[in-house]
Image (tube, rainbow, N blue to C red):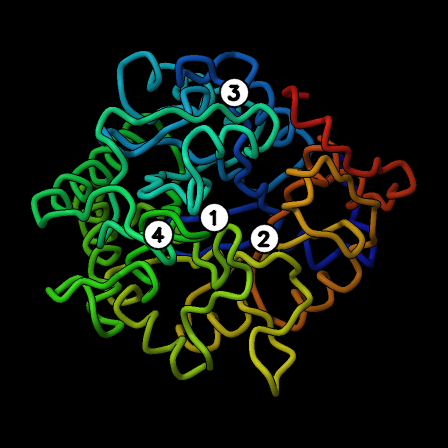
Amino acid sequence: MSTEPPHPAAAPLFEPFKAGGLALDNRIVMAPMSRDLSPGGVPGADVAEYYARRARHGVGLIITEGTFVGHPAAGNRPSVPRFHGVDALAGWAGVVRAVHDAGGRIVPQLWHVGQDPLLWGKSLAEARRTAPKGVELVDPPGGLISPSGLEPGSPAGRAMSESDIAEVVEAFARAAADAQRLGFDGIELHAAHGYLFDQFFWTVTNHRTDGYGGDPAGRTRFAAEVVRACRAATGPDFPVILRVSQWKVAHYQARIADDPRALETFLAPLVDAGVDVFHCSTRRFWQPAFEGSGLNLAGWVKKVTGRPTITVGSVGLRDSDFLGYVEGKGAEVDDIGLVARRLAEGEFDLVAVGRALVANPAWAEQVRTGRTDGLRPFDAAALASLD
């Protein structure tokens, strides 16, 4: 990585960042992207090198692909890496070593699918036919569970009992403790896109009448309990990032909060529980979150919580949508001027890059030095291997 001062247009991306126990050399984050390339759920040497290559070229923080916690219903894709079991954890230890040896920082994205939104409105056979290329879907050992045994519009899977909830909370706490033991630099909890946490958040999938449903405090209670349990398992200084979104898989107009006041009410219990950083997932980072303001979701979350935020959504790519890869669509290169300016203005604190980093392992270095003419467009075929 060059030691020369960064190109002026990119300079805001290369300022150091610190929040609690998270200290980074720059503001560039590798976004979590499922790769389904860990046979048997065990990340191998190729996975370690895939992440280390990005760290070697200057990515400040790597958030791994989603990795299933140790609960029987957590995951239904056998080639997604697990975050439990001696074999998988040994694989992750190798990933951590490789990234640290390359000078990077890394956190795992801990995941439970709940009533998998890839199955909403479909049988397993139908979902297999329409799933993204390379994604294998199976029935998880524990069946599919969710807050109310619902998918949008119909019953599906099994409603979670309070003992189910306690077991899942404990599974996340174990995973957090394992992450710390293995040397990870923090954790991210996947609470976005219609997966289990988000199924509690969304009134369409949470019809509970006990303390885990109803008002925002009830609908965020499960997530808050997970955050507190992870914090208790790791101590006060181990960074906890929470990924949130308004949209869900195949429900792109869905909203948890219709205005900034509702957003503040929704997020307050999660701030109180101990979230350090919010990772605010949008499909296009430049789009406003609410009418009457140009702030995006990360900007509003920072404003109403006072916590640092990560923005994400087609960074470095021309007007596109990351879900286009499902249909085999690529995306052309775009400049980073707008996201860098908004970062410099303080709208958000960190910038997550996804497909552009898949296409260009040296993206951070190329942007830093102004050699962006050599950046390759994103080709969906790149997801078939770990380059």
Indicate the quadrant containing the N terminus: top left, top right, bottom left or bottom right: top right
First in residue order: circle 2 vs circle 4: 2
Q: Which mark is residue 16?
A: 2
Q: Residue at x 68, y 68 (%)?
A: 342
Discs 2/3, front: 3
Element assignment for label 4: strand
Give x and y (percent) for residue 372. Answer: 86, 43
Relative vertical location of residue 33 with respect to residue 214 in this rendering, above or below: above
Gap between marks 1 and 2 measured at Cα: 8 Å
Q: How would you rate the neighbour count of disc 2 (Cα within 10 Å): few for under 14, some for 14-19, many for 20 or more?
A: few
Q: How would you rate the neighbour count of disc 4 (Cα within 10 Å): few for under 14, some for 14-19, many for 20 or more?
A: many
Is 253 left, or right, of 381 in this rendering?
Answer: left
Gap between marks 3 and 4 measured at Cα: 40 Å
Q: How would you rate the neighbour count of disc 1 (Cα within 10 Å): few for under 14, some for 14-19, many for 20 or more?
A: some
Q: How would you rate the neighbour count of disc 3 (Cα within 10 Å): few for under 14, some for 14-19, many for 20 or more?
A: many
Most extreme residue toward the right, as rendered?
373
Gap between marks 3 and 1 measured at Cα: 19 Å
Q: As shown in the figure, which amino acid type bears the numbered disc 1?
A: Ala
Instruction: Provide the residue designation for mark 3.
Output: 98
First in residue order: circle 1 vs circle 2: 2
Q: Quadrant of residue 277?
A: bottom left
Q: As shown in the figure, which amino acid type bears the numbered disc 4?
A: Glu
Instruction: Provide the residue designation for mark 4.
Output: 151
- Check contact, mark 3 vs mark 1: CB within 8 A: no
